[in-house]
Image (cartoon, rainbow, N blue to C red):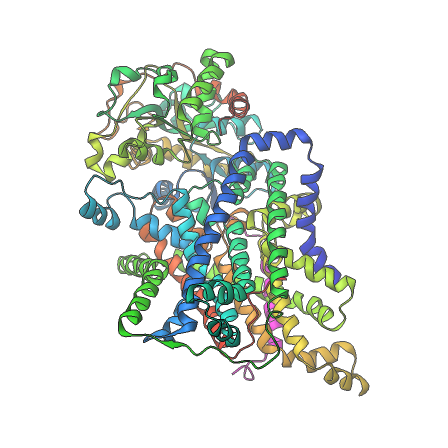
Amino acid sequence: MFKMLNIKKMFIAFMLAAVFFTIVGQAFAQELVVYSGRGERLIKPVLDEFTKKTGIKMTLHSAGTVELLNKLIAEGERTPADVYLTVDAGTLERARIAGLLQPVKSDVITKNTPAEMRAAENSWVGLSLRMRVIAYNPQKVKPDEIKTFESLMDPKWKGRLGIRTGSNVYPQSHTAMMIAEKGEAETEKFLRAIVANAGDKIYPSDSRAVEAVAKGEVDVAIVNHYYVYGHLRKTPDDSKTLAFVVPPKTAYNVSGGGILKTSKNKEAAQRLIEFMVSDEGQAMFAEENREYPVNPKIPAHESMMKRDKFTLTPLSLSTMGRHMMPAIDLIDKVGYR
Amino acid sequence: MSIGVAAVVGTPILFTLYSAVSADFELWTRLYDTRLKVILPNAIKLLAAVGMMTALIGVTMAWIVTRYEFPGKKIWKWALILPLAVPGYVLAYAYASIMAPGGVFQSFWTGLFGDVVRSPNLYSFWGVSMILSLVNYPYVYLLTRASLLSQNVAYDEAARTLGVSGWKRLRSINIRLAYPGIVAGIALALMEVMADFGTVSALRYPTFTEAIYRQMTARFDPYGASALGSVLVLMTFLLLNLERYFKSRSRFEQTKGRFRTYVPQKLGLREGMLCNFLILFILGLAFFAPISMLLKWSAEVALSGGLDSRFMRFTYNTLLVSAIGATVAVALAVPAAYLHARKPDILSRSVFYLSTLGYSLPGPVIAVGLLLTAGLLFPWLYGGLAMLVTAYIVRFIPVAIHSQDSAISAVSKSLEDAARTLGAGPWRTIRRILLPLIKPGLLTGWVIIFVDCMKELPATLMLRPVAFDTLSVRVWMETSEALWEMAAPPALLIVLAGLVPIAILIRRIDRGGWHGIPSA
C-alpha cells in the first residue's frame, strides 16, 4: 500500500505546510476578537445575536478570567484581542490599573449603567449583577440564625459551613469589598473564623457548595445567588433542602467587559459593548443565568427575588477593585486555600 | 544534530528545575503552607490506592487469562486492553454525568436503597482512585500476562511434588516470579497517574498537575508553578528508575534448563461463567458502560444537528496539529535513535535518557517551562502553533526514539557497512538502506504519537493559539459547563482514534517480542 504513495514528496510538502502554519499567525481583519472569562454557553448566544444584527463576525476565545488577564499582560501590544469579558469586576479593575483598557465615551453606557457598576471613564462596564448570599438548608437552619456573614463566624457552625476555594475570584472580590468596608483587621478575623468553621469543606466551585447544602453535606454555604437558582432549576425537588438569604447591604459583583487599548477595531468593539448594555442585550445577558440586569429598569426573570427585597452595599465596584491585591494577600496569609 | 534535539527537549525541563532550585526559601515555605501540605499527601495517597487497585485488577485478570481455559477467553484476553483507548478525563466525565443528580445512576440507587444510604460521591478520593485504576490497569495486565506466560512450569511442578499447597504455590512461586512484570506495570500505571491532569481536574481532586495549572493561570506565578513542577519531576524520576530497574531483571530468574510453559487448565461450566462474569464486570465499568453513554449522546447531538461546521473545524484543528506534531517528532527522532543504536557513547546515551524524561513530565510542567523559555528567548514564537507543537514533541518524542531505536538495532549493521564500502555517503546510506527497512517502526511511532497528541489536554489548554480549540479542549469546555451531551462527540472521536494504536499493539504482541510501553 505504501509503495503507491510517494512518501518523500508528501513529507516535504507536509513539512512546508507545517512550517507555514506554525510561524504565521492568524489574521483577524474584519472580526472582533473577544477574550471571554464568561462561560461559552452563556456568552455565545449574545455574540451570535450581535453578529446577526450588525454583520460583524466574532472570534471567541474562552478561558479563565484571571488566566486571560495574565495572557493579555504577557501578550502586551501583540495581543489580537479587542474585547475582554470577565465574570468579576475586581479583575476588570486590575486590567484597568495595568493600563490595558480603553476609556469610552458613550451616552448609551452612561444612561443604562449605574455609576457604581462601571469604571469612572467607562474603561470597563458591568453587564450583569450577582450578589454574594448565604445558601442554607431550611430543614436544619432558621433564617434568623444567618442574618449576616459575620454570624457565620460563630463556632456553632463548625463543620456545617461550606465555602469556595480562596484561589477563585468570587471569594477574593468578596474579601476585597469587606476590606474596603471594615478594614483589614476585621476582615482577617472574619476569614480566620470561617476557614476554621469550614475545615475541609472548601469547594472548588460554587455549584458544588450549593449541591453540598442540598444534599446535607453542609448546612450553610457562601455562594453567588444564581447558583442556587441554577441548582433548583435542574432539581426542583431540592427546594425543601435549599434556599438562600441575602444579608443586608451585601457584597455584589458583576460580569463585565472592556475594550483593549491596543485594539484596532475600537468602533466595532464599542458597538458590541453598547449592544450588551442595551435593553435587548441586558435581557439576554441576565435571563439565561438568572442574574440581575445591571440596568435597574430592566426586570429580572419573574421567578427571582424582587429587587426591593434586598440591598447592596453602597460601595462602588471600583473601590472593591482597588482592594483586590490586598485581599489576595490576606487570603494567602490566613491560609485560606 | 541530535544535540539540537536534546536542546529542544531538554531546555524546558532544565529551566523548570533551575527556576525551582533558584527560588528562594520563602517561596518554598509559602508553597508548602498553601499547596504542598495538601497535594503531597493527596498525591501519595492516590498513588498508593491506584497502585493497589490496578495490581488487584491487573494481576487477577492476567492470571485468569493465562492459567485457565474457558469460553470467550480468546476475545477477552485482547478486550481487556480496551480501556487504554479511553483518556481518564473522558471516563471521569462519562461517570460524572451518569451519576449526576437526577440521572440514571441516582434513580437506580434510590430505587435500591431509598434515602437510607447516601449514594457514593464520584468527586471524592475513592471516585478518583477508581477512575484512574480502571483506565490504567491494562498496563499491569499486559506486563503481568507477559511475565506469567514466560514462566517455566518446572518450578510449580517441583513444589507440588514436595507437597506445597495450592495457595502457597501461588504466592511464593507464580506471583513471586511475576514480580518484575507486575511492578513494571504498576510503575507505568503510576507514571500515568502522576501525569494525569484531566481526571483530577474534572473530579476536582487537588494534586500536583491541577495545582501547577492553577498556580500558572489563576495566580500567574510561573516560578511557584515550576517549583511545584520540580517536585513532580523528582517523583516521576524516581518512578521511572524503579520501572527500569525491574525491567532489567525481567529475565534473570528463569533457569536455562528445559523450558515448558503452563498448560491452561480447563474450567468447569460454573467456574467458566464466573470468570466471564468477572471480566465482563471490569470491562463493563471501564469501557462498555461509558462508551455506550457516549454513543447515545453523540447520536442525540448528531440528530439535532449539533455536528456543525464548528465541530468540523475542531476536528480539523486536532488532526492538523497532531499530524504536525507526530511528523516533526518522528523526523527529529531519527538522528537521536540512530546514534543511540549504532554509536552508544555518553552523548547519545544522555540524549536518549533526557528525551525519555519528557514522557513522564505532565503537560502543565512542560507548558510552564516552554512559556518561561519562550518568554525570555523567543517571544516572537508566542501565539502561533509552534509552542504547542514543541510541547507535543517534548512530551512524545521518546515514543519515536524508542521504537526507532529497537527497529534500527534489529537491522544488521553489515548492510550499511556494505553500502559504505561501495561508496555511498552516510546520509545516502541512511536514506536508501536503513529508512526503508525500519518503515514499520517509523509508522508505528507516528501513529502512537498522533493519537497521544489528540488526547493531550493541559498543554493544549495553556498553549493553544487564540480560538484554536481541539477535540480534547472541547470535551474540557463542554464538561466544565455540564453540557454532557455536547461533550460526547469529541470524546467519542478521541476514543475511536485511540483504538487504532491498540489494534497495532495487539498485532505486535501476537507476533511476539513485546517489551512494554516505551520507557527507558
Image vertical order of residue A234 relative to residue B431, above or below: above
Residue drawn at the location 21% of the way across and 50% of the way down? B108
Image vertical order of residue A151 relative to residue A27, above or below: above
Q: How many marks?
A: 0
Image vertical order of residue A262 relative to residue B459, above or below: above
B326 relative to A40 in the view: left or right: right
Residue A81 position within the rendered picture, expressed as x and y whole percent measured from the top left: 52, 41
Front position in the image: B513 or B35: B513
Residue drawn at the location 68% of the way across and 75% of the way down? B409
Q: Which residues are magenta?
A: A1-29
When asked about the image quadrant of residue B389, the answer is bottom right
Q: Is residue A24 magenta?
A: yes
Residue B407 position within the rendered picture, expressed as x and y whole percent measured from the top left: 63, 75
Quarter the C terminus of chain B occupies: bottom right
Front position in the image: B275 or B394: B275
Residue B216 position within the rendered picture, expressed as x and y whole percent measured from the top left: 56, 39
Is residue B197 visible from the viewing direction of this image?
Answer: no
Image vertical order of residue B173 relative to residue B69, above or below: above
Quarter the N terminus of chain B occupies: bottom right
When asked about the image quadrant of residue B274, the answer is bottom left
Q: Is residue A102 magenta?
A: no
Front position in the image: A88 or B159: B159
Residue A168 position within the rendered picture, expressed as x and y whole percent measured from the top left: 46, 32
A285 relative to A302 in the view: left or right: right
Q: Please, which residue is most extreme toward the front here?
A: B162
Is residue A13 visible from the viewing direction of this image?
Answer: yes
